[in-house]
Amino acid sequence: MTKLSVRSAISSVHDAVRTQLWPLPTLGIAVAVVLGVALPYVDARVDDHLPGWLTSIVFGGDADAARTVLDAVASSLITVTSLTFSLTVVTLQLASSQFSPRLLRTFTQDLFVQTTLTVFLATFTFSLTVLRSVRSNGESARPFIPRLAVTTSYVLAVASVIALVLFLAHLTRQIRVETMLHNVHRDASSTLANNLRGRDDEDSSRSPLTPVPTFAVSLPAQSSGFLQRINRDELVRAVADADVLLSIDRQLGSFVVEGTPLASVWRADGHPVGAEVVDQLQKKMIKSVHTGPERTAAQDVGYGLRQLTDVVNKALSPGINDPTTAIHALGHVSSLLVQMMKCQLGPQTLRDAQDNPRVVLDHPDFDHFLDLALAQPRHYGKADSQVTARLYELLGELGWHASAAQQPVIVSQLASLRRTAAAQDVDELERQHLTELDAKVVHILARTTHSPGQASGESG
């Protein structure tokens, strides 16, 4: 198992757990129940042996006072928890309507929100559990007041109040568009680092298999949904055991429909693949290739770019009309594209333990990502010269980092942007500014290419 495969597997598990809102609060509730049962038991054993300084600190009231404290903490905390959920839902609605529905995963995986809910629910559960152990003189021959447990409940209540204040401060920061863009950019960068190698790294996967032959057998998808993740090592082992070659013909993040071709399998010697082998591979693929109802950031390296582009598109819509947000988001798009340019993009070949090529993954290339990032913003932002100017600047920023193979893609996008700018109804001063930016991009490409005439010739 390669380091890249390990990082990808860990990232998939981490994403699956972190994006769920319930695991951490559920763990907190379970711990609170255990402590709520165990601490009164400890109280009963050590109550008569507490040192004097500790006795003066812990709760010193009677059973009725203990019930009042525990009841007040429990009732208030369930109210505060409801308020916290309400604020979180309002934030999710704001993010969905104002920026993009695909930002909701960014909020549900917010560790601060999960921790805050955990503190609230754990405090409520602990106080309610301890309440059942309080006994007064009229209720039992042996009255019992769990002083340590009641004191702990009070401390948790104070911690919950502090957590509420910090949560409100955190929430006001999280709903800022700059924070959202930063978080998406950070997660997308992490996905790139966990799933792609550097452009200059030596990697046998860069030498692809031969094209899928016409006699290859198609393996249909067993369920509909977005292609979320692939267990590479498990899939390679299954293909190697069958002594065949396999190509995943759909990209991570694409929507597959049940019964349509998902992969192709064939033998290197040209002999037909037996029906039994096809059935076995189909069963192994169900375990190795996972689909779901939404795209995830675990292995889908284009998902973060899709989120950022959605923010740009939403900001440029007539209902929002916020070009400043679009320009800010394009800055993050540019930075993420530069990071992608430094990675190995395009189809990947996975090899078995004997270094034989076994599986081809249809990963998108730089052309795909650049078109994804620019096509829609160029269309929706064509009425705003500032957005067009930022797109020119983006191409110039990419030009400084482009390899020889990536430069023609930038030149092609520059030509498309040039046609869009030419069709804009702007005044002479704005048009002159766009022309200067165009010339600047051409100059950058000319400085960073071995054939300057190619970039310059495109400017005519």
Image: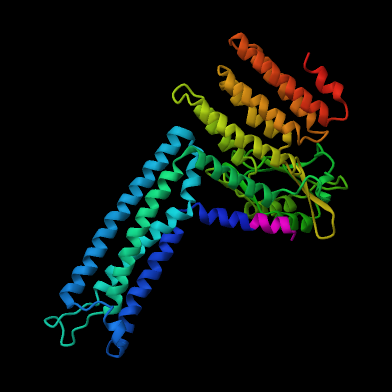
Q: Nearer the viewer, residue 308 or 221?
A: 308
Q: Position of residue 250 (x, y in %)?
A: 68, 40
Q: Position of residue 200 (x, y in %)?
A: 81, 46
Q: Is residue 97 above or below residue 80?
A: above
- Tell whether 97 sits left or right of 50: right
Quadrant showing the C terminus: top right
Q: Position of residue 141 (x, y in %)?
A: 15, 87
Q: Nearer the viewer, residue 286 or 117?
A: 117
Any magenta on residue 5? yes
Q: Most extreme residue toward the left, as rendered?
A: 138
- Tell whether 29 sits left or right of 316: left
The answer to whether residue 339 shows anywhere in this view is: yes
The answer to whether residue 299 shows anywhere in this view is: no
Q: Nearer the viewer, residue 415 or 269?
A: 415
- Tell whether 115 sits left or right of 133: right
Res 416 → quadrant: top right
Q: Is residue 323 above or below residue 185?
A: above
- Tell whether 122 sits left or right of 264: left
Q: Most extreme residue toward the bottom, as rendered?
A: 49
Residue for point 76% across, 28% down: 409
Residue for point 30% across, 78% down: 148
The stretch in magenta equals: 1-9
Quadrant showing the N terminus: bottom right
Q: Position of residue 59 (x, y in %)?
A: 25, 76
Magenta span: helix, strand or loop, mainly?
A: helix
